[in-house]
Amino acid sequence: MPHLKHLLLLSCIGLSPACIDVPPIENPPKENPADPDADFTFTAAPVQEQVLPGGTLDCNVQLAWTDTTGGAITWSLMSPPAGIELQASTLPKGETRATLSIRVGTSTAPGPYTLTLQAKSGTVTKQATLTVTVGKPGDLVVNWVVPTPGKAYTRGPLLLQFTVEGGTADNVEILKDTTVLVKPTGNPYSFTWDTTHEAEGTYQLSVRATRGGAVFTSAPRTVIVDRTAPTVASFLPAKDAATVGVHDAIQVTFSEPMNPLSVTEAAVGLKTGTGDAIPKSVALSADGRTLTVTPLSALTAPSTVQVDLTATTSALTDLAGNAATTPLTWSFSVPTWLPVGGALSAVEGKTSAEDVILKMDRNDQPVLAWVESDGLNKNVYVARWTGSTWSMLGTGLSGLAGAGTDAVKPTLTISPQNQPVVAWTEKSGNGREQILFLRQWTGDAWAVLPSAPLTTGSTQYPSSPSLAFDTNGNLFLHVCESSDNNGLVQGFSLPPSGSAWADLHPAQPSTHYHAASISVAASGNNFFTAYSTYDDTTSLRSIAVLPNNGAPLGGITLGAKAYTPSVAVDASLQPWVAWAQSDTAEPNTDGQIYWSRWNGSTWTSPLNISVNSTGNSRPSFALGTGAPHILVWSGVINTERSIFVSQWVGDSWQTLDPQLNALAAQNTPAFSPSVAMNSAAQPFIAWIEADANAASIYTVRINR
């Protein structure tokens, strides 16, 4: 019978393959090799603080790897005093705690010693020091068992234990400060101190043993009697905070250090406003006062988040065991958009901003340009976000002196050297004449750029400039040259440090009249110029897009009664364009926002994206990689003008609710939005919003 199992197995051999199913032999998992250069830290604490010659000093060590795990740890004493040696000891790989034994020879001289303990793993060595006092032969040595070195906290009974070695003491006393607390008996000695009748505060305990008139004293122990419950000093985010980022820290700071053993993941609740738990980790700061709650993934926006520090019956306690008092719950809001600073205005008082444009600089910081009156003229202002505040770049820009020389519709771009470049037209006072000006920021001042070769006069003038750089640092300017009879798209380029503009001769068809509202998108060395024009072949005002100043893309124009286009380029170098369409030529009254994109051979059919609002105007496009494209515009719902935002998800536009309004009051219209994306495809939006006194600029960024 003992061989029955083998006979049954052999009987299956040669029969049907289905007789026995032998699983494949798998190689055992390989253990990850230790990193010989893994960094680490360790602590060392002697079990005794006094030892007699011929005795042994025990030392508890604890290891922590910084990042990766290393191999075994070998221990040694550096230049130990005569008669003191460490027994050979190695901490095996994977272990982090050990007790080392240090022998003190019989001939070791009495007195205090500072020992340097070295730990080595591969090529990495670390050191820690510990102190010990070697007594005289024949003396008594007194060592605490509990409390251990450091501070001991209590709110009630506290166990006190110690040993007396080297002989029998005539008398043993525990001192509380300078008075005798108790005279315990037995060895090891033990006493439970009831502190409930002691005043709260700090006490120094020591043990005094006497023999034959000689006094032998232990090292002191600090005991803190604390019956006061810890309170919350601050919440972060603040209670009911309304603008919390999805990656913002969640912290609560207490009035005193907390017990790390009470700070567990189960003791801290993190959930949504609907009660769904949010996976998280918790950590207590080194000083024990700050508890940090870290969601395992970014918070959802928009949402409400609640933090509950009473999630379990095991309360958070301080080091003495006092439970934290209420309130221990708070909530905050995580909105879709976060403000970038507050209301922005260049001039104090009742002045109104106009025509804001937003660009991202090379450091992913937003830069704004706009027009604002100083009480005499409308000037151009530029501000850059520093990460914490808006910093004005110089003072107001004006090319002409005298009253009534108002700046109009600035444009903005950022040079490869991260220098903002701005262009605008300014009314001269000579009929309808406007003059184009260009400036470049040098770091501390605005430098004048060469004038473009444009014709100006009382009936002929430039308008609607647009700027962009190519990858070689060439600056491109597109502008409408308008007159009573026509409007032409003009294009020029200026090389780095150049003094003269080269004419690009944009291929505007002869059937396109009264070009206006230029928008330019650049990707590398590819440029797409969109403009509104009266197309004589269709007898409609439509939108045309010129690729690299060539003939209109697709040979057609888009839309009917179309104004103020915005063009952007996707990662495939295909342009997308949006515009306002209005039967009355007043989009703020009856405008609708249409859009189309080039698919490589044709334009998609224009579609209305603003069916739920009226008076839609001033669309602005931003296309990103790895994140939804963004289209914004100004429109009206329920008599209130707001900023609408749609994102391209899948193959359709989805509205991002709610609409953007910086001011909560009614009759505070928001208009003229401008959108741009940083390198992480996170959109920033700037717009102008007016109250009863003035209009200011507001900027937000997506909360993700």
Image (tube, grey):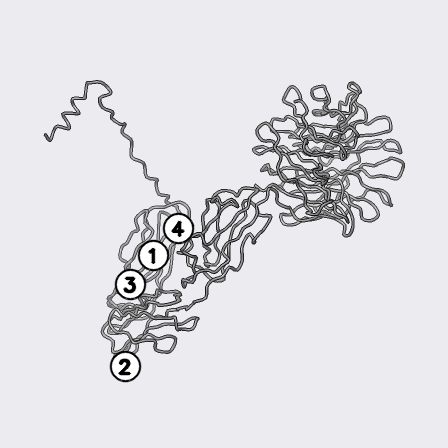
Q: Residue furthest bottom?
A: 213
Of labels 2 and 4, earlier in sequence is 4
Left or right side of 278 for 647 = right
User: Can you identify the residue that label 3 sits on?
Assistant: 57
CA distance for labels 4 and 3: 25 Å
Q: Which mark is residue 40?
A: 4
CA distance for labels 3 and 2: 27 Å
Q: Residue furthest left?
A: 1
- Neighbour tally class for label 3: few under 14, some 14-19, many 20 plus, Cα within 10 Å: many
Of labels 2 and 1, earlier in sequence is 1
Tag 2 and tag 4, C-beta contact below 8 Å:
no
SS class of the residue under badge 1? strand
Q: Which mark is residue 276?
A: none
> Label 3 is placed on what type of residue?
Leu
CA distance for labels 2 and 4: 49 Å
> Label 1 is placed on what type of residue?
Val
CA distance for labels 3 and 1: 13 Å
Q: Who is closer to the viewer here, 614 or 214? A: 614
SS class of the residue under badge 3? strand
User: Can you identify the residue that label 1 sits on?
Assistant: 61
User: Can you identify the residue that label 2 sits on?
Assistant: 213
> Label 2 is placed on what type of residue?
Gly
CA distance for labels 2 and 1: 38 Å
> Label 4 is placed on what type of residue?
Phe
